[in-house]
Image (tube, rainbow, N blue to C red):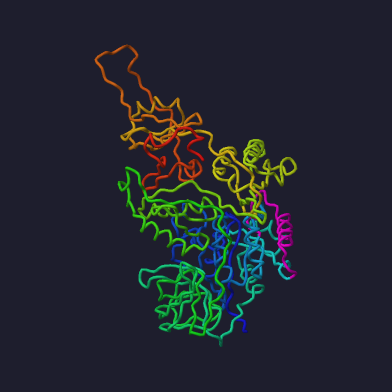
Amino acid sequence: MKTVEKIRNICIIAHVDHGKTTLVDFLLKQAGTFAEHQRQDERMMDSMDLERERGITIMAKNTAVYVGDTKINIVDTPGHADFGGEVERIMGMVDGALLLVDAAEGPLPQTRFVLKKALAQGLKVILVVNKVDRPDARTDDVVNFAFDLFMDLGADNDQADFPIVYACARQGWCTLNFSDIPALLDGSKKATLKPLFDTIIEHVPGPQVDEAAEFQMLISNLAYSDYVGRLSIGRVTSGSVKKNQKVIRRGVDAAGNSKNENFTVTQLYTYAGMKQVEVAELMAGDIGIIAGSENTDIGDTIVGSENGKALTRIVVEKPTLGMVFSVNTSPLSGKEGEAIQSRKLRDRLIREVRNNVALRFEEAATSDQFRLLGRGELQFAILIEQMRRENFEFMIGKPTVLYQVGENGERLEPMERAVLDMPATAVGDVTGMFQARKGMLTKYEGGGETGSGRVRLEFDIPTRGLLGMRSRYLTATRGEGLFSTILLGYGPHKGDLPHRNNGALVSDRSGVTIQYGLMGLEERGQLFLGPQVDVYEGMIIGENNKDQDMNVNPCREKKLTNIRSAGAEFLVTLAGTRDMSLEQCIDWIDEDEWIEVTPKSIRLRKKALAQNARSVKREDRIK
C-alpha cells in the first residue's frame, strides 16, 4: 500500500446551523478558487432551490481546493437528523473530518450522530469551535463537552488527541491559540483560515492506495448532466481508469440479487473549486466522476476487469417512519398540474430511492398507492415539495411509525432524544406538552445560574410523540425555541398517545366558497379557507371545535328579497383563516384523511368523499 501525499479527502460534519456551508465558502475564497472579477454568492454549496429557501443543507456535495501543490477534496454534509443518510454514505470517501461545534450551543444530537459514524470509520477528526464571536460563547466549556463526547463514543487514544481550531467562519478567520481570540474580535489582530489548511495537511493522512491493483471505485453520490447523462461520483480506492476504457458495474437488482453491466467510460471529471474539470485519467486516492452508464446506483462498485470484486455496499440506519403516496383521485385532479398515473408515480419514487439510500420503497395494498420509508417528517416534506415543483399532482397519507418485535414477542417502537433550547419562561408549557406525549425529562441545564434567561431540556420520547410537535413547540416558545432530535433505538411500546382532539369541518357539496356561508361557520371552528376557493364534497375546510366531524355548506349564498330593514345591510368580514403549510398539514391529518398536493395548492380531504360512506364519530373513523 502507498500513501498519496498530495491529496487530502475530508468531510465537514456538524449539527444543523453550526456554520458548515459558510466555512466552505471562505475555504474556497481564500484558497484562490475564484478570480477577482468573479461573482461569489453566499452559501455556494447550497445549489438546490429548497436549500437556499430553507437555509439548510439537504444533499451532500463535493468540491476541492488547492493549497500549494496539495489537493484537498471537501464534502459538505447536511446537519439535520432527517438527512443522516447523506452523511453515512459519504464516510467511505474521506480520511478525515472537520467537526464543527457552535461555541455557544456546544455538541447537539446530530453532533453525536455524525461523530459516532466518523469514529467508527476510523477518520481523523479535527475539532473546529465555530462562532467564537457570539456574545454568549462559552468556548472552554464547549471544548470540554466535545472531549467528553469523544470519550463517551469510545474514541481511541489517537482519535481523542484531536487538534482544536477556534474559528469565526462568517468573518473568514481562525486561530490555534485560544488567547488570540479577544485580539481577533476587536480587530487589533488579523488572521485568515491558513491555520485550518495547515492543520488539515498536517493531521489528516493521505489516502492509502494500491496503484498496481485492479481499478475499483465505490459509488457514493450521483449527479446528472444534460450532455453525458448520469454521473457516478466516488473515490478511486485502487488502480486507475482512463477515458474510453471498458469497465464493469457490479450492482444489485430490485430483489437484491447481484447484477453486472459492461460499459465504456465516456467522460472523466475531477473537482476543482466549484467546477467539474475534464481529465484523461483518474488516479487512486482521488475523488472523481465517471460518465458512461445510465444504470449506476449508490453503493455500486465500478471495476476494471472481470476479476475485480465488488466493495462492501453502503449501509445506513433503517428508517423509522412510513408514508403512503397515492394517485390523486380528487374531483379537481388535473386542473393545476399533471395528474400522473400510478406507473409514473411509482417510477418517480423508485428514482428517488435509488438516489437516496436512506429511503426505502414498498408496494401498498392497492395498485395506485405506494409506501416510502424514511427518517423523518422533514425528509418527506422536502421530497413532496420537489415533486410539486416538477408539476406532479398526488396525495399523501399520515406518517406512521415502523414497529419491531422484541425477543419475547413484545412490541417495540423507535425512541428519540429531543434537545430543546428555549426561554426560561416557556419551560412549564413545553414540559407539559412533552410529558403528555410520553416524554421523559432526562436533563435540565441553564436557568438562573447561566444568566442567559435560556434553558436546555432533554427528553427521551417515542417517535410517535414527535409527530406534529415541532409547530406546537415553536408556538409555545413564541418562535424563540430551538428543536433537534436524534434516534436512540427501539424501546417498549409506550401505549396510546393523544394526537388531534378536534374533528374536521367537511364540505358537503362541490362549488365555490362564499364569504356569507363561511361567516356562518366561524363559530363552529377554525377555518382553513377563505372565499372564492373551489371545494368538493369530502374536502376539509377547517377544524371543528368538537371532537367529531361536521358536514357543512361553505357555498351558501345570502337570499335576496325585496324586503329591507334598518341595520340589515352592514359590512361584515371573516375574522381570519389559518394558513396551513405542508408540514402543518402532515402534522394535522388523521388516518382517514389525505393531503392533496398540487403545484399550486395543498388541500385536505377525507379518504371517503361521500357523506354516506363515512362516519363523523371519531371512534368509528379512527381505528
- What stretch of residues is rendered in magenta? 129-157
Q: Is residue 131 magenta?
A: yes
> Is 228 in front, or is 619?
619
Tell which residue pokes out farthest to the bottom in this image. Answer: 212
Q: Is residue 550 above or below residue 330?
A: above
**Residue 597 locus on image (x, y percent):** 40, 47
Q: Position of residue 80 (x, y in %)?
A: 56, 55
Q: x and y percent of residue 226 in the render?
A: 36, 68
Image quarter of residue 474: top right
Quarter location, residue 516:
top left
Residue 130: name its quadrant.
bottom right
| Number of numbered callouts drawn | 0
Q: Residue at x 31, y 48 (%)?
A: 334
Residue 337, image x, y percentages: 32, 50
**In the depicted structure, whether residue 43 falls above or below residue 553:** below
Q: Nearer the viewer, residue 433 or 322?
A: 322
| 363 in the magenta segment | no
The quarter of the picture where the N terminus appears is bottom right
- Closest to the observer: 64 or 435? 435
Farthest top residue in view? 566
Residue depicted at 58% across the width and 84% down the height = 210
Left or right of 203: which side holds 232?
A: left
Q: Is residue 112 above or below residue 285?
A: above
Please, which residue is most extreme toward the left here? 562
